[in-house]
Image (cartoon, rainbow, N blue to C red):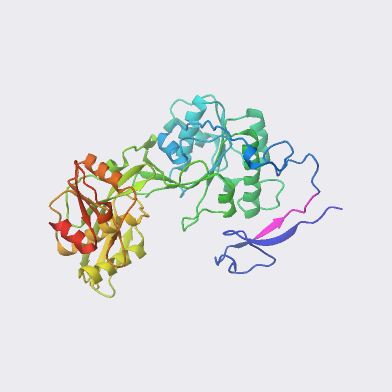
Amino acid sequence: MAKKSKTVFMCTECGNEYTAWQGQCSYCGAWNTIVEHKVAPAEEPAASDTRRRLGGSAARPVKLGSVGTHDYSRISSGLSELDRVLGGGIVPGSLTLISGEPGIGKSTLIAQAAGRIAGKYGNVLYVSGEESEEQVKLRADRVLGEISDSLYIYPETNIENIMAACEEIKPCFLIIDSIQTMFSASADSVAGSLTQIRECSGQLIRYAKNNDVPVFIVAHVTKSGDLAGPKTMEHMVDTVLSFSGERDRDLRIVRSFKNRFGTTDEIGAFRMTADGMIEVPDLSGSLIESIGSEEGSVVSAVYEGSRPVFFEIQALVTKANVGFARRTAIGISQNRLNMILAVLDKKAGLNLLDYDVYVNVVGGMNTGSTSTDLAVALAIYSSFRGKTSPRKLVAVGEVGLTGHLRSVPNAEKIVQEAARLGYDAVILPERNARDNEDIRTIGASNISDAIRAFVS
């Protein structure tokens, strides 16, 4: 007699299970994340069942010291900026999850990589669950030009049919666009549900590991910018990439949040054009239009992976008209801005209680680093006092609650890049200050010293 499937309720954030629905997950504290999930009845595993094994042969415990390691020969995507983020290329048998807002350019980037891989390595299968063959062909004509005969398009959403097509074509690279449109006939739920995403992801993982075929999975994001679907999917894949950018700007940034085969500090830069994604190897030069001094403008830098990235931070301080003063931050944390304003008030005597403060990182960059604190503080001071620096300079440093400047990593490489770009001086924490023949380095122990160095 066939066993009936049972229903459980699972949190999409942490994966915790419940017997009944509730508004808040008691494990991770998230609200409205618990959804219904149907569990198939357990079956007696056959002796030849290899669903839980990454290889076809029977698994047994072995000594870790005796396990051999593979010398991975990476596949180049044909886009050096994407290869940089992946750690040097695509590893065979790996699963890469790439997410981003609708219309940001995920499918365009993947189509360009697919066309270049097909022209160099062999068959590539592009599975589109959202667009028809004609729609994909129109994009390919625009961004690829000449299309390789090894590039296949398959508009399908049934994962079993996709696996059958892979057995027939035997691709060296597989693209799923997107995972939310896929469904498995073995799961009794609609496409995009928790059950379907987990089942389809599981089948793709088994196929990739058993056949050493790299798989790229495109995923949607929620209104808050988080990855849509179960959080466990991020744990299942090898690499998680985020493709971001402002809609009113052409700059696009690829950032790695997880990478089992490389660092998570690298970023890749592209520009969205009518002919597709154009790589931006000199990101600093594209973000800074002029290195001259302007009121309320200070240049800062962060070290991303293997290169320093320079950008301009602008601040505007103006008298508040009515009500409470506004604090607006674009590109930096709002909480970080409030902390810097409190330090300027307490340690530098800048009373901004009745002033609106606006801070913006030019170019649509989101720094996410504390090394830009000093530049934000100096830009606010410059706008409030109406003063500019007599030199073309860069400011780097973390501002502590005591007003002291804390050291930042890779400061010497930032100084070298500043000299190359033609700056006159760099203001940085005293611990990072080192003599340099090509550029003047000014060490400051606290925020007051930095302000004096800025205006002198």
Specify the segment rendered in magenta. Answer: 36-43
Q: Looking at the image, can residue 287 be seen?
A: no
Q: Looking at the image, can residue 215 be seen?
A: yes
Q: Nearer the viewer, residue 265 or 192?
A: 265
In which quadrant of the rendered view does residue 331 lie?
bottom left
Relative height, residue 380 to residue 75 (above, below): below
Q: Nearer the viewer, residue 389 or 276?
A: 389
In which quadrant of the rendered view does residue 271 lie?
top left
Residue at 46% across / 34% down in the picture? 112
Relative height, residue 399 to residue 65 (above, below): below
- Residue 218, given in percent of the width and then of the height, sits at 53, 44
Q: Would residue 165 appear left or right of 368 to someone viewing this image?
A: right
- Residue 437, given in percent of the width and then of the height, sits at 19, 41
Question: Would residue 39 be counted in the magenta stretch?
Answer: yes
- Residue 416, given in percent of the width and then of the height, sits at 26, 42
- Residue 78, given in percent of the width and then of the height, sits at 44, 31
Q: Would residue 35 appear left or right of 318 to someone viewing this image?
A: right
Relative height, residue 329 to residue 169 (above, below): below
Question: Would residue 22 be counted in the magenta stretch?
Answer: no
Q: Quadrant of the C terminus?
A: bottom left
Q: Would residue 443 appear left or right of 187 to someone viewing this image?
A: left
